[in-house]
Amino acid sequence: MAEITTLLQIFIWGLTAGCIYVLIAVGLNMIFGVMKVVNFAHGEIMMLGSFTSFWLYTYTGLNPYVILFISMILVGIFGIIIERYGFRKVLGTGKLNEIFLSLGLIYILQNAAVKLWTDDIRKIDSPFSSMTLDMGVLNIPYDRLIAIAFTALVLICLYLFLIKTDVGRALRATSQNHEAAMLMGVNVNHMYMLSFGIGAALAAAAGTVTGILSPFNPYMGTIPGIMAFIVIIIGGLGSIPGAIIAGLMLGLVQNFTIFYFGGAWKEAVAFVLLIIVLAIKPTGLFGGER
Amino acid sequence: MTGTQHIRTYAMYLAYLFMVVIGLALPMAITDDFFNRVMVLTFFFIMFSTSWNLLAYSGQASLGHAAFLGIGGFASTILIINGASSIIGVLVGALASSLVGLFLGILCVRLKEWFLGLVTFGFAIIMAAIVNESSVFIESLNGLLGATGLSGNLDPHMLGGSLGIYSPNIVPRAHYYYLFFFAMVGTILASHVIIRSKIGFAFAAIRENQAEAGMMGVDITRYKLIAFMISTFMAGFAGALFAPYNYFINPEIFSIHNSFMPIIMTISGGIGTIGGPIIGALVINLVWEQMGLWGMSIDRLLILGFILVLEILFLPRGLMPLIGKLLNKVSGITSRDMPL
């Protein structure tokens, strides 16, 4: 039996990993909810977020947590462009075309990033990187606490936006039935762009947080991207609460697995979880009938 | 079938026959080693794309086909290193791949489109991660090489030393050329026979409308699993041949790039047609190798991405319809009623 402090530390580390999954998966899920499109290149958009922040950080030297918001806006705009000139064109021509389009985007984004920033390993230095919250037996780095608090903040803002504002209501309406929403005067095309923008911005946030916590290179997005897919399947496609719970769960399970069985099983355990969920409830834990 | 359609069909068969003759004659005309290797690679990709295309024909698009390539490759290499004959190694490799394919198929049988894509995509990544991080697994299976990769040696005469084509006047590398050439022709013929058979009709029915196919009495689960098993057998077969030929295999074989190549090739040629993967793999692989000769490494990946995106946006049915039009012109048909 491991010591309680070790377990607590794994818990915190798992929670931060889970927060990153939640940020990517919620964005992915939102795009799916509104557009019924799964963007396979979402991990690559996250990578783009890391590099945008890294690039801004290198040139301006601002606090990475300020840059985080600028990066979210820039990548959000990029997401809107991808939606407008990519996915919009193939919407409704068959699911396979949408899948293949996002595969093409993976190639383009990954290799464009290598061209622009080379494939050296990079890291965003946080001013808090050497500071830890001393809890007697356990030291928790501030960066991890900020990551958790930031995710919570983003989720609360997103919730308020979706519930309280007219635009949020229009977004939810489009997600439920886009023809009915159209009849009620919602500009569905704007909603598509908005959802893609928010999804890309959340991915950029996840990318920046990852870049602060650990080193990265242009290939860093693939595995978190896959994990986010697994999270939304486990949580139920289209369900945001499902994505949050499943994301945190996956982060925790993975970190405890690393501790007990070794790093080789980190990805495998996610797949095992996926198999179990698909076998028992293919619509996901929080998914409706489909 | 009308008379003109017959002509069209004959024109198509003639075109295929022409390609076979050219394929057989090429190594006698060009003895360059590099050319030989590029052609072997092309044949390998045609097999791999054909395998992917067959699964897509049943409405199931795999985004992680490299998983089966890798399973076939690892299984056959490990067997051949440990003294099994090449033919046993290759067959067992293909069978192993097919078994894993059956397992994944059972898992995916209720899934469609995105779900299926997610699971297959994730499956290849996870296979790579498992093999990558358990180098113990690789090292324990062979004491021959370091942790970087396995290597085995493929017997080029495993399929038909007695076919009479192998003669001392042909450079040794060409023996591999013929091995892959016949393996490719076999794969294409198998794909052709399956697509034109009752099984193929069931695949198409499921792809077009699963609910209707079910009502008409098509056993959906059974045919989906059959599609998975045949396709993964072919992919495993291609990998099981290629890895020992290449004299090297490492977890890179599970890479996303290897999963996407057959997709890009099949789409370039024309998805759901027999000729599509052939034309697509030929064109894309030759372009790819040429870009390599020009010293492009990252750029060619970038270009590949643009090719895929532009094709999806502007040429979603690939090159095949264009070739179909050409064939129509040759055989004097103006209608488009004959599918390739």
Image (spheres, rainbow, N blue to C red):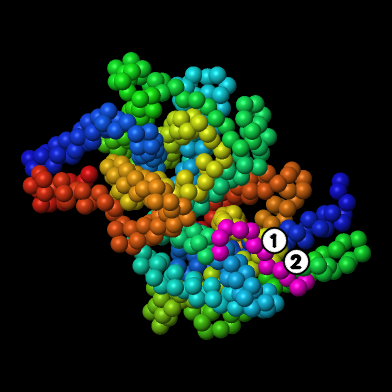
- Check if residue A123 falls in the magenta segment: yes
Q: Quadrant of residue B340?
A: top left
Dominant secondary structure (helix, strand or loop) of the stretch shown in magenta: loop
- Marks 2 and 1 share the same chain: yes
| Residue A97 seen in the figure | no
Q: Quadrant of residue B16?
A: top left
Position of residue B32 measured from the top left corner of the image (x, y, whole percent): 34, 34
Looking at this view, is A78 or A149 the one in front?
A78
For this orientation, the residue located farthest to the top is: B162
Position of residue B259 measured from the top left corner of the image (x, y, whole percent): 46, 46
The answer to whether the residues at label 2 and label 1 have Cβ atoms under 8 Å apart is no
Vertical position of residue B109 compared to residue A248: above or below: above
Local packing at callout 1 (Cα closer than 10 Å; few below 14, some 14-19, many 20+) is few
Q: Quadrant of residue A233?
A: bottom right
Q: Chain of mark 1?
A: A
Secondary element under disc 1, as helix, strand or loop, is loop
Per the rendered image, the range of residues in magenta is A117-128
Q: Is residue A196 left or right of residue A134?
A: left
Q: Which mark is residue A144?
A: 2
Position of residue B89 measured from the top left corner of the image (x, y, whole percent): 49, 24
Vertical position of residue A282 compared to residue B248: above or below: below
Residue at the spot of label 1:
A214
Looking at this view, is A140 or A70 the one in front?
A70
Secondary element under disc 2, as helix, strand or loop, is helix
Q: CA distance from mark 2 to mark 1?
A: 11 Å
Q: Chain of mark 2?
A: A
- Check if residue B150 falls in the magenta segment: no
Local packing at callout 2 (Cα closer than 10 Å; few below 14, some 14-19, many 20+) is many
Kindly identify the residue that appears in the image at 11 percent across and 45 percent down: B330
